[in-house]
Image: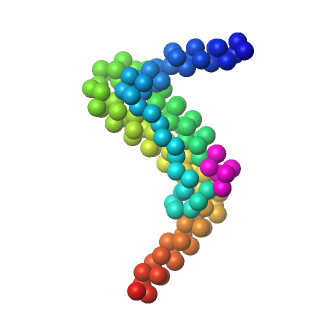
Amino acid sequence: MPQAAGQVARYAADPTVAAMERLQLGIGPVGGKVRGVQLDDRQYDDLQRIGGRLAKIRLDAFTNLPQFRELPDEMQVELIHKTINAAREAARTLLMMQNPDIITKAIVAKVAGIQAKNLR
């Protein structure tokens, strides 16, 4: 149990967590599709884990800086949103590299959509 108490204390003292709470920001779930392709459970778990870790690392890099705290709240919110979106896109790219079938399925769906549009 002491480990859990230590984790709670670290969370409460985390500058990224403090900034997001002060700005009343939460992080919504990542979508279950990449380039229109539905992910299986393992792929979705990977996407969430990778995207979350990348976002945390990137957010930690600037929320600890005094210059970040000097920015207007609106700019802080925008910077956090852009950082999370960029981390999620990087996670999607990595997931596609690890699972080339996602790319293949996305291309097949895109071609089918174009062909169906041309038949109209």
Given residues 98 and 24, the one toward you in this image is: 24
Magenta residues (range): 40-46
Please tell me whether residue 9 belongs to the stretch shown in magenta.
no
Q: Is residue 72 left or right of residue 33?
A: left
Please tell me whether residue 41 belongs to the stretch shown in magenta.
yes
Residue lying farthest to the bottom in this orientation: 119
- Please report the residue visible at 47 percent of the width from the left and 82 percent of the height from the top: 115
Residue 66 in the image, given as x and y percentages of width and height: 36, 18
- Please report the residue visible at 62 percent of the width from the left and 18 percent of the height from the top: 7
Residue 4 in the image, given as x and y percentages of width and height: 67, 18
Residue 97 visible, this orientation = no
Quadrant of residue 45 within the rendered picture? top right
Quadrant for the C terminus, please.
bottom left
Q: Is residue 102 left or right of residue 56?
A: right
Residue 31 in the image, given as x and y percentages of width and height: 52, 50
Quadrant of residue 33 within the rendered picture? bottom right
- Please report the residue visible at 62 percent of the width from the left and 49 percent of the height from the top: 44
Quadrant for the N terminus, please.
top right
Residue 80 in the image, given as x and y percentages of width and height: 40, 34
Residue 42 visible, this orientation = yes
Q: Main secondary structure of the magenta part?
A: helix
- Please report the residue visible at 45 percent of the width from the left and 39 percent of the height from the top: 84
